Amino acid sequence: MPRSTVLVADPETATLERLREPLDSAGLRVVGASTVREALDQCEEGVDVALVDADMPDSEGLELIERMKALDPDLPIILVSDRSSVPRAVRAIQLGAYHYVQKPVDPEKMLPTIEKALETTSLRREVRRFRNDQSKPYSFDSILGGSEAVAELRALLQKVASSPASTVLLTGESGTDKDLTAHYIHYNSARASGPFMHITCSAMPENLLESELFGHERGAFTGAAKLKRGLFELADGGTVFLDEIGEMTAALQAKLLRFLEEKALKRVGGAKDIKVDVRVVAATNRDLDRDVGKGEFREDLYYRLRVLAVHLPPLRARQGDAQLLAKFFVDHFNQEFGKNVVGFTAEAEKLLSTHDWPGNVRELRNAIERAVLLAENETLGAGDFSMLQSRKPAPRQVQLPPEGLDFKRLERDLVLQALDRVDWNRTRAAELLGMRRDQIRYRIEKFGLESGNGRSAPSG
């Protein structure tokens, strides 16, 4: 295993000679540099920790720290000075120095500091490697689809990702991979090395969501036993993905708008503004234009979020992509389940190409997963997709009375048609009508609706 390298950048050899033997005995490789140019050359060859004298002959030590950090942001640098200067130490830390020590350097005290710095180097580089590995699946070339709609989406996402805009709004039906799209935007942006944080706004009550986003101070409320940093703080320099933004309450909408405009937040129970730099990618399957018109979503927040708007096309609008995605998912689930499915019969391919996929890519993925898992043959036939072929009751036709429009009956029949179309699944019926699930439930109770076989609507 290669030894870690310690660079001692000092115009005099005293510090280097004092440290060489104890560091070598500790299994470390020591290299020296008496000028800035030599120090930078050593950095380019690769070092794991650097001790930098504050008074280099061809440059001030603080300037060398900046140049070394530009070459290797993860390199821990220890500033060494023979003058006790608090302002200089503070400035060194601001520039990214790991530590500050005074001459003469004591090897016994220096060794533990160097060992901790090496641990920091290893951890930082491991995090960077992990983030790079994470970003590989999110190259734009990996967006599957040969349709014109996907080609246009791919081109738009490249522009959005490279843009410095701090807000992006993703719209589209459920199942169109808005979560995956947010990852594409993050990992192809200048923020790719920063954190990616994700939260679903409908998954928790208002007070808990506020704490998750903005954090809270110790004692801010019952149970707040210690300070908590929120997602916006933790994602500084990166991206926060707010899924189902249309479900956010009016009070939180106002706080989010303030944060986006001022790029600062206050923790719950706090009084101090905390500046952070994050990109917010918000997503919704709701019609926010309509919600703004009905007063259910703040108009100013809507326009602030949609600085860059991306609409994800439904699968039915992506000609030929269903078959391509189906083959990809077959390969994926073959590996996961240890199967050897090699393709589809002509009947199965026709079914996949003609189905309208109301659940979009998510529905297709689930259908392929089930088919591969239960497959008894190497080729999937139409019978392996029986869930797609099941016939639902024909939608009831709206009959207008001769004397005019009966709005109550029209509302009732529209709700019935939506429920019939999705096999009486309340959540999906609400999506079709642009409603919330509780609004559908209210109308089912209001009109005393039941499905064709006499059962009440399932809660799905």
Image (spheres, rainbow, N blue to C red):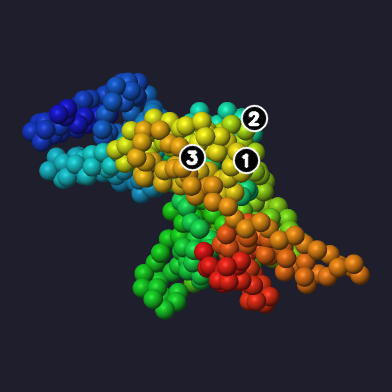
Q: Where residue 109 sits in the image (x, y, percent)?
A: 16, 45
Query: What residue is at 49 percent from the left and 67 percent from the top?
Result: 204
Query: What residue is at 81 percent from the left and 69 percent from the top?
Result: 407
What kind of residue is marked 2? Glu
Instruction: Please identify the quadrant where the N terminus is shown.
Output: top left
Residue that mark 3 sits on: 382
Query: What residue is at 59 percent from the left and 42 percent from the top?
Result: 355
Q: Where residue 340 sits in the image (x, y, percent)?
A: 33, 33
Asked if residue 180 can be seen in this view, the reply is no
Residue that mark 2 sits on: 148
What kind of residue is marked 1? Arg
What kind of residue is marked 3? Ala
Helix, strand or loop at mark 2: helix
Residue that mark 1 sits on: 316
Q: Where residue 137 sits in the image (x, y, percent)?
A: 43, 34
Helix, strand or loop at mark 1: helix
* Mark 1 or mark 3: whose residue is earlier in sequence: 1
